[in-house]
Every structure is written in structure tokens, then in C-alpha cells.
Amino acid sequence: MRRFFLLLPSLVACNGDDTGGDGDDFTLSVVIPSSYSIHADTDFGMAVVDDADAVIDEAVGVIGTDTEIDFTVPQGDGYAVHFWIDSNFDAGTAGTCDFAAVDSPDHQWSYAVGTVGADRIFTLPAHNTDFQDVCASFE
């Protein structure tokens, strides 16, 4: 007696998205270029925020020691890096983000990162005086 077997191909569910689908977290590595070394040995705070300025992840470090900061972020659009250096030029409080205005005690920036859909590296633009108030991200 002959036996016949019916072989059915396996079905694999695919979402059509090569980034792993919703809910995946990725590493966003932020590189601090050497132009910030004018603030060597100064504490800093850094946060990744979404397009509503909600903090997704944050870190602290020391300029010159910590040159690449890794953040864990979900897949998304509209990310930015908020960055402040605890300079305290002529005023301010150590360990506190002081408002960034002309002659501000602390230097602060907001840099657009854009979309994160895979692990990626983002290098901050060179040190500049285009300061922005980002203290709300560090309260």
C-alpha cells in the first residue's frame, strides 16, 4: 500500500516592516565632538525628547570623559537631543540647569535627530552659541 503525504508550506506572518515592528527599542548613540572640549571636566546633562518634548531617556556625564552616550529609544519620528553644560559662567547653581539667555550661566542646545528606526549614531554639531532653553527637560 502506498502512502501519500501532503506537504503544506509553512506560513510566516510578516508585517512588511524591516525594522522589527512597533514596540522595538533601538540604541541612539550621541557623539560629543571635540569642539566641546573648551568645557573639559564640566558636568553635562543630555536627554532625548520626542516631538512633544517629552523625555524618552536621559543621561549625565563629564565633558572630555564621556564622548559617546547611548540612549534606548522606541522607533519613532521627530526626536531631538537636549543638551546642557553646567558652566555657571558668572552666576548659576551647580547641578542645576540655569536658563540659557545672552550671557547665560549654562550653555544649552536642542538638536533635531529625526527618525529612529534602527540603531544609529548621531554626532552633535560643533560647539556654537546658538543657545536654546532646554531646562524643562531636566526638572
Image (cartoon, helix red, strand yellow):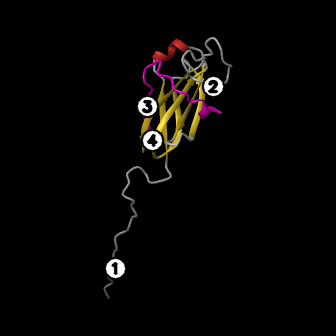
Measure the alpha-carbon separation of dots 1 and 3: 55 Å
Q: Nearer the viewer, residue 19 or 83?
A: 83
Instruction: Tell us which disc is closer to us: 1 or 3.
Output: 3
What residue appears at the point 55 percent right and 23 percent down from the top-left corner? 66
What residue appears at the point 39 percent right and 64 percent down from the top-left corner? 12
Q: Quadrant of the N terminus?
A: bottom left
Q: Residues within 10 Å of mark 2 (few under 14, many from 20)?
A: many
Secondary element at tag 4: strand
Location of residue 134 by image quarter = top right
In percent of width and height, residue 51 lies at 49, 42
Q: Residues within 10 Å of mark 4 (few under 14, many from 20)?
A: some
Location of residue 60 by image quarter = top right
In percent of width and height, residue 57 lies at 57, 38
Residue indicated by mark 1: 5
91 versus 47 height, above or below = above
Q: Which label number is shown at residue 78?
A: 4
Measure the alpha-carbon separation of dots 4 and 3: 14 Å
Measure the alpha-carbon separation of dots 1 and 2: 71 Å
The boundaries of the magenta stretch are 119-139
Q: Which label number is shown at residue 97?
A: 2
Indicate which disc, 1 or 4, sits on the residue closer to the N terminus.
Answer: 1
114 versus 88 height, above or below = below
State if disc 3 and disc 1 touch (CB < 8 Å): no
The three-letter amino acid code for the residue at tag 4 is Gly
Secondary element at tag 2: loop
Q: Nearer the viewer, residue 85 or 66?
A: 85
Residue indicated by mark 3: 122
The three-letter amino acid code for the residue at tag 2 is Cys
Location of residue 2 by image quarter = bottom left
Indicate which disc, 1 or 2, sits on the residue closer to the N terminus.
Answer: 1
